Amino acid sequence: MTEANNLEEYIRDLKKRVQENPEDGVTHYNLACVLIGEARYQEAEEELKKAIQFTPDLAEAYVQLGGLAMNKGDLLTCLSYNQKATEFRPRFAVPHGNIGFVHMQLGKPDEAIKALRRALSFDPKFLQARSTLGSAYLMQGDIEGCIEECRKVVEQEPSFGPAYNNLCLAYMEQGDFAQAVRYCDLAQQYGFEVAEQILEELKPHRS
């Protein structure tokens, strides 16, 4: 039996279980997670809404609903779902990180920094949150803050491309183009798509 067949069988099994026990919020949630993995987002959203209907304090379900809203470009709904998740699980780092990310997208670095620091206080190894915190410091003009946070990220995970991109931008701000080129190359090496404008600006500084 192929992996796809196994997965379809697992989905059928979960659907059977929710039919037998429709008020089991956790099974609705588990089914939704599998559907998200299969990019069946509409079905997943329906299952997640059932999950919180029957298990209203299931913080992970709100986070996943926030992710689906983000996928549609609906930042405010994403923000709302993640805020709801923190009400039920105040020390759950992921929604705080997501809140920080949304505030960055909305151009509110001060709000982002508060949420991201909160996320990191609950999970200091939350790399995405720390890298986004670096971006927020950069947006604020705190270049040293950005460098400090992004260095911590790449020390922990040397292949984390977005942090190298932040370091590239920070060193460009400082006028240290040799370092900027180095970090630009590392960002690209680890799969980050550096903005074309940055690549153009760095061209004259390549030996």
Image (cartoon, rainbow, N blue to C red):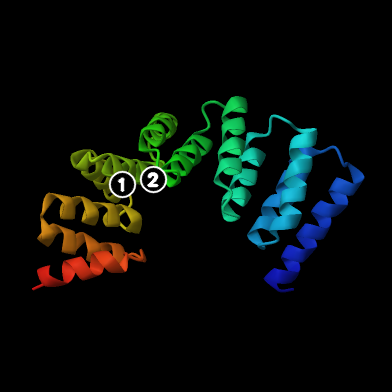
Q: Left of 154 or right of it: where is 81?
A: right
Residue at image x 24%, y 46%? 151
Q: Position of residue 15 (x, y in %)?
A: 83, 53
Q: Residue 130 lies in what quarter of the image? A: top left
Q: Nearer the viewer, residue 120 or 73?
A: 73
Q: Position of residue 139 (x, y in %)?
A: 30, 44
Q: Can you see residue 57? A: yes
- Which secondary structure, mark 1? helix
Residue at the front extreme, as displayed: 107
Q: Which mark is residue 43?
A: none
Q: CA distance from mark 2 to mark 1?
A: 6 Å
* Quadrant where the image shows the C terminus: bottom left
Q: Can you see residue 189? A: no
* Quadrant where the image shows the N terminus: bottom right
Q: Nearer the viewer, residue 153 or 17?
A: 153
Give the residue type at disc 2: Leu
Query: Which residue does the numbered mark 1 point to in the structure image?
Result: 153
Residue at the right extreme, as displayed: 20
Residue at image x 27%, y 46%? 150
Vertical side of 63 occupied by 197: above or below: below
Give the residue type at disc 1: Val
Q: Residues within 10 Å of mark 1 (few under 14, many from 20)?
A: many
Query: Which residue does the numbered mark 2 point to in the structure image?
Result: 127
The answer to whether marks 2 and 1 mark residues whose Cβ atoms lie closer than 8 Å is yes
- Which secondary structure, mark 2? helix
Vertical side of 156 occupied by 79: above or below: above
Q: Position of residue 172 (x, y in %)?
A: 17, 55
Q: Position of residue 122 (x, y in %)?
A: 44, 30
